[in-house]
Amino acid sequence: MGTNYDGTFSKAVVKGFIDIPEKTAPGTPDTDVGRLYVADDGGTTKLYFKNPAGLATALTDAATVNWDAIGDAGGAGTIAFGTNAQVITAAKTNGDMLTISGIGNFGDVSVVRIESGTGNPTDGTVLEVVSHDANTDPLVVSSSAQAGVLVVAQDGSVAVTGNQTITGTLSATGGLIAGTATNSIQKTDTVALTNANIKALRATKKALVATPGADKFLEFVSAQLILNYGSEVLTESSDDLVIQYATSGVDATAAITANGFITAAADTIINVLPKAMGAVVATNLVNNGLELFNTGDGEYGGNASADTVMTVKITYRIHTAGL
């Protein structure tokens, strides 16, 4: 800036560059010189600083400073974004895009911690992992000894390797399968019978468990037959029930007495256990399902309103025969 005769200021123009001597302390003689200048960079005018070693830095390029040029912070700090949403993007395709590594001899602490700290949330998610493409799993967790110990796949399935400890209740809406091809698997299925199903159990047996597959057989564990009473009682003469292996007719239970259960005038439950089974040819059991059958000489009748129904909860194990 310059001063005009009338006391106003005029614009000072520096052509070339400004050499700024470096000062270590007041009164210390000049040591090195830093140079400040303006230059063109692909059509953009930029302000540069050049150090005594000749390294030039564009002072207007703060937004493009490489991460590896960021020095170690002087102490613990906080980055506060306020109400502004931030997005980190990476176009790298031939390797991991962002890695956070804990390289110290740390103890019982976390390398990365994501938490909901303050406020009064009414909904939302603390951590959301999203994949936009069907070829990419949203989440894979690995240990030092094995990759993919926990995998949450794009289709929603979860694969876990190793022993798991669950504290509390495990709920499985679609049923629960546990075990391997050589170990036993225990399941409980729920089967609904309509009024028409109940009244046709002699002619049309009700499938309870499907065939388990080649070289596998079902072990009947227990069943609970739940009669949901309607308006009038069902009737029977001497027509008991049995749970049997479907194609062979081998009984898995003793006779289930119909009188007092089928003919009950209230909601009624009967618990059914397996019967002792002698030697059975393996083909009668292997890859065979379980079904509910009316063993009497006639179908059930009564209940003119046709509003009595039944639910069967059947528990069974699946074994590999190894034959």
Image (cartoon, helix red, strand yellow):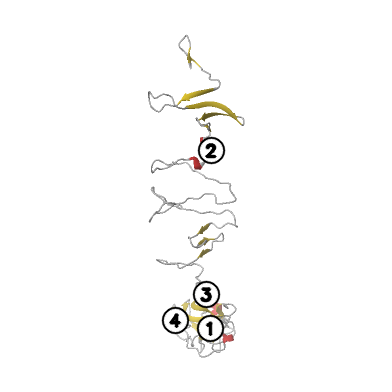
Q: Distance between the residues labelled 3 and 4?
A: 16 Å
Q: Is mark 2 on a helix, strand or loop?
A: helix
Select label 2 or label 4 by which is in front: 2
- Identify which amino acid the numbered label 4 is placed on: Asn
**Residue 298 point in image, percent of width and height:** 56, 87
- Identify which amino acid the numbered label 1 is placed on: Gly
Q: Residues within 10 Å of mark 1 (few under 14, many from 20)?
A: some
Select label 3 or label 2 by which is in front: 2
Q: What element carries label 4?
A: strand
Query: With respect to residue 44, does 80 lie above or below?
Result: below
Give the quadrant of the C terminus.
bottom right
N-terminal-most mark, 1 or 2: 2
N-terminal-most mark, 1 or 3: 3
Q: Distance between the residues labelled 1 and 2?
A: 84 Å
User: In this figure, which residue is indicated by the disc labeled 2?
Assistant: 64
Select label 1 or label 3 by which is in front: 3
| Residue toward you, 258 or 6 | 6
| Residue toward you, 44 or 231 | 44
Q: Distance between the residues labelled 2 and 4?
A: 73 Å
Q: What element carries label 3?
A: strand
User: In this figure, which residue is indicated by the disc labeled 3?
Assistant: 192
User: In this figure, which residue is indicated by the disc labeled 1?
Assistant: 301
Select label 4 or label 1 by which is in front: 4
- Identify which amino acid the numbered label 2 is placed on: Thr
Q: How crowded is mark 4: few (under 14 residues within 10 Å), some or many (20 or more)?
A: few
